[in-house]
Amino acid sequence: MNKLHSLYIGLMSGTSLDGIDAVLAQIGPNGETSSLDAVSTPFSPELRKVLFDLQSPGPNELHREKQAGNALALAYAEAVNQLLKKANLQPSDITAIGAHGQTIRHQPHLGDMAYTHQTLNAALLAEKTGIDVIADFRSRDVAAGGHGAPLVPAFHAQQFQSTENLAILNIGGIANLTLLPKDGEVTGFDCGPGNILMDAWIHEHQGNTFDENGNWALQGKVNEVLLTKMLADPFFIKAPPKSTGRDDFHLAWLQEKMGQDNHHAEDVQATLLHLTAHSAFEALLRHAPQTHTLIVCGGGARNNALMNLLKVKVQHVFKGSIEVTTSDSAGIDPQLVEGLAFAWLAWAHKEKRPANLPAVTGAKGPRILGACYPA
Ligand SMILES: Nc1ncnc2c1ncn2[C@@H]1O[C@H](COP(=O)(O)OP(=O)(O)OP(=O)(O)O)[C@@H](O)[C@H]1O
Ligand SMILES: CC(=O)N[C@H]1[C@@H]2OC[C@@H](O2)[C@@H](O)[C@@H]1O[C@H](C)C(=O)O
């Protein structure tokens, strides 16, 4: 390894609640980042349930939240140890871990009382790994009046430099779009539900955690009335800065839109697939019609039905002027982009570089993100 480069580990567990992506990154003096290795470990059904139950208010939350933070730290430590073993490295080889934690509330609209909470016992993670841990990346941006999300646009700007207009669409639990014009300011915002509602609906009806390749959705027929009702949610036309999460999009939201009408379950799944594709496509159409290439990342990039639908919509309106691809084309596994981003955010913290983009989050200014728990 070049002496000027350092090794960082990024740990991401996102709104899908599917598990942990741990990415080993090599980062250069100007933040040039490349992924060297990775492990992805699913949550145990028990931990997934504990984290899922915390997504909505309930009894004895403080104790349950602290216990979940400990359990998550232990699961993160296990992922780090697996990654170190796989890459044949020692804890002393790693400069720091950037750990996202698990978002269990996101309330950026409360003025001086705004908050966003990513549960994680970062002290326990530092203790168990013997590596400096940087965590709680979003709070400082929120304290500065921002949404604290999305944070990845700054990393996308670093990583996907180009001489043409790019847009990066992350389809995780929530979908977010980063716009990288070839000359102009980087912008970005959450554009709506990604996989979160499709995952919830198939889990409710078939017990699966996700709809592989959208196969179940493809058995149904889109219900245009329901789709129109869902797309009428004010979030979709709200001007950025904007962010969202499980606080806004959940099964009760879907049930409210469905009302008392009878629906075939697979038709609802088909409609949810179209909701994700349509809301992301509309965001692109409204905010970045000059895009040359749309790069899709996040687990949704692995859903063939979703990718095909997006391509059809883009082709229909833009007639070949926008190419749709996945981050594989830039050499990054779509599911690892966010993990890599949190390694980069840890680097930015260590280097005392601000990493939020006020034009994205709405914060009063650039801020150094995260808090350090030394080994
Ligand atoms: N082969 C596949 N077919 C369909 N969907 C898939 C496939 N692979 C992954 N997914 C979807 O991707 C999701 C995981 O995506 P990802 O890990 O990017 O989300 P996340 O990081 O948890 O969310 P966020 O970006 O909102 O924080 C799964 O829950 C599933 O819905
Ligand atoms: C509050 C929160 O956890 N937001 C997540 C979520 O997942 C996707 C989207 O909503 C994005 O805003 C953000 O995550 C990524 C990593 C971000 O901050 O860019």
Image (cartoon, grey):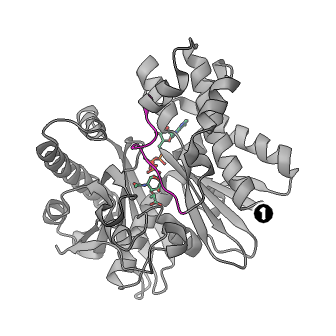
Q: Give the residue at mark 1.
A: 292
| Residue 110 vertical placement versus 92 (above, below) | above
Is 218 magenta? The answer is no
Which residue is drawn at the image coordinates 23% and 33% (left, top)? 46
Looking at the picture, tell me which residue is in the foreground, 261 or 104: 261
Which image quadrant is residue 208 in?
A: top left
| Residue 271 vertical placement versus 12 (above, below) | above
Across and down, in percent, residue 266 comes to 58, 18
As drawn, is 363 to the left or to the right of 217? left
Across and down, in percent, residue 298 comes to 53, 50
Assign a secondary structure to mark 1: loop
Which span of residues is magenta-colored? 241-251
Task: Mark yes or no: residue 215 visible.
Answer: no
Q: Tally the numbered discs.
A: 1
Across and down, in percent, residue 163 comes to 74, 76
Tell me the amino acid under the disc marked 1.
Answer: His
* Disc 1 crowd, CA 10 A, few/some/many (<14, 14-19, 20+): some
